[in-house]
Image (cartoon, rainbow, N blue to C red):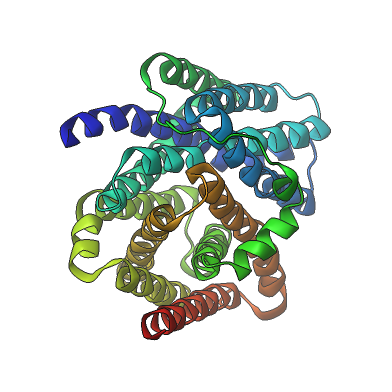
């Protein structure tokens, strides 16, 4: 049975991998492509943020829809919409249409990772949830390695070529899901309730106050710190270590490799040995330590050490939090995972905006330290909640 499940989930892993390869092909070229249309640095920031803002608003709604109508149709529609948004971005005639295409991409892509996580929640027992959730996250990490490399090769043909290629990949992915992936949802929700999802601020506040509030805050802190790293590291590496784009790409590729290896090979054994709660706390504190030290690295060797510590903590933290949410939910898997993804999106929006302000006001080290403080605070808050629960 377990072997059959593993083979069935391979279709899901492959779909997730192809999706994130397409995203990874687009992400590195986004600023340069937008500059062809005269985008200012401020407009570039809003262009990047528009993707996560849309995900923040839509993810809980998509999760509820999947609880009512099934995971497979939502995944297929999400991938078809993603394909169209990639092609529209590559063929956009103006900056205004770039914003439209980017927002549409965020809308449809919000139906990929949370619904894939919900699919795993439907298909696995609580005991094996961490194993399969970590493999899904590892697949995304691998896609971030392959995508930028493919983007660099394809951009040589034409600036728009990687975007069109990513759209073709997403379309093929949707076709693949339609024909080969079985539906995982056996008991569908009786009706579709969208009111709470449409008023997303209410859903967020309810999530913070609910029993999963500390876990949602951990995901917010994780995304906040990671988004800060993705934005701040290239600036730090260029200013302090005289890195060029290729060397920065190597560091990000190393981060993806470490994350994929830890999540695919070691994480299930670590959780089995120490439990979910200790793994999450260790991951949060480890990521914080790496984040705080990265911008003080004096040379390349020490830099890779600090980056590895941060990536190791991140790799332990996120899939374990998602597995714990999936195991404990009393609502539909899609509803819970959609709301969790919304918290991540909120962190990706706020993180770079606050980080950019801090860089101008207090220097390149400040945003890394802020991300570390968020992670330490969320880890201590989570640890306290666990102790209170155990003593109650």
What count of labels does the image hold?
0
Kindly identify the residue that appears in the image at 36 percent across and 17 percent down.
Answer: 180
Residue farthest to the front, as pictured: 190
Residue 362 lies left or right of residue 298; in this view the side is right
Q: Quadrant of the N terminus?
A: top left
Can the viewer see residue 338?
yes
Relative to 278, residue 26 above or below? above
From the viewer's side, name the closer residue of 168 and 209.
Answer: 209
Kindly identify the residue that appears in the image at 81 percent across and 29 percent down.
Answer: 94
Q: Quadrant of the C terminus?
A: bottom left
Relative to 89, residue 178 above or below? above
In the rendered image, residue 277, in percent from the top left (x then y), is placed at: 34, 71
Would you identify the image quadrant in which residue 34 lies? top right
Can the viewer see residue 157?
no
Relative to 213, residue 2 above or below? above
Kindly identify the residue that appears in the image at 39 percent across and 39 percent down.
Answer: 122
From the viewer's side, name the closer residue of 70 and 174.
Answer: 70
Residue 1 lies left or right of residue 232; in this view the side is left
From the viewer's side, name the closer residue of 61 and 262.
Answer: 61
Kindly identify the residue that appears in the image at 60 percent across and 40 percent down.
Answer: 64
Residue 135 lies left or right of residue 353; in this view the side is left
Residue 229 lies left or right of residue 360; in this view the side is left
In the rendered image, residue 198, in percent from the top left (x then y), is placed at: 75, 46
In the rendered image, residue 19, in percent from the top left (x then y), is placed at: 47, 32
In the rendered image, residue 99, in percent from the top left (x then y), is placed at: 76, 37
């Amino acid at each position: 049975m377990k072997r059959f499940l593993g083979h069935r989930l391979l279709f899901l892993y492959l779909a997730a991998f192809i999706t994130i390869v397409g995203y990874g092909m687009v992400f590195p070229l986004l600023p340069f492509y937008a500059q062809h249309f005269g985008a200012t640095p401020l407009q570039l920031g809003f262009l990047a943020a528009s993707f996560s803002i849309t995900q923040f608003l839509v993810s809980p709604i998509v999760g509820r829809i999947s609880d009512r109508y099934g995971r497979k149709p939502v995944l297929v529609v999400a991938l078809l919409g993603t394909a169209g948004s990639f092609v529209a971005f590559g063929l956009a005639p103006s900056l205004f249409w770039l914003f439209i295409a980017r927002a549409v991409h965020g809308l449809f892509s919000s139906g990929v990772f949370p619904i894939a996580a919900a699919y795993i929640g439907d298909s696995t027992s609580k005991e094996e949830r961490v194993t399969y959730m970590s493999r899904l996250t590892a697949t995304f990490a691998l896609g971030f390695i392959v995508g930028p490399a493919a983007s660099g090769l394809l951009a040589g043909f034409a600036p728009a070529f990687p975007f069109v290629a990513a759209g073709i990949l997403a379309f093929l992915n949707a076709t693949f899901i339609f024909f080969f992936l079985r539906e995982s949802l056996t008991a569908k929700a009786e009706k579709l309730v969208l009111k709470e999802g449409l008023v997303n601020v209410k859903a967020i506040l309810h999530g913070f106050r609910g029993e999963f509030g500390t876990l949602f805050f951990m995901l917010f802190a994780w995304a906040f710190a990671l988004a800060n790293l993705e934005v701040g590291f290239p600036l730090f590496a260029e200013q302090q270590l005289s890195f060029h784009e290729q060397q920065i790409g190597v560091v990000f590729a190393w981060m993806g490799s470490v994350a994929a290896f830890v999540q695919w090979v070691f994480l299930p054994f670590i959780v089995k040995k120490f439990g979910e709660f200790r793994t999450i706390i260790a991951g949060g504190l480890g990521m914080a330590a790496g984040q705080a030290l990265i911008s003080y690295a004096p040379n390349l060797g020490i830099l890779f050490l600090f980056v590895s510590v941060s990536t190791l903590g991140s790799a332990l933290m996120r899939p374990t939090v998602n597995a714990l949410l999936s195991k404990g939910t009393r609502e539909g898997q899609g509803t819970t995972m959609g709301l969790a993804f919304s918290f991540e999106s909120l962190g990706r929006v706020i993180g770079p905006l606050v980080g950019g302000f801090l860089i101008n006001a207090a220097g390149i080290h400040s945003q890394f330290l802020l991300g570390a403080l968020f992670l330490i605070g969320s880890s201590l808050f989570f640890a306290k909640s666990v102790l209170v629960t155990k003593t109650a």
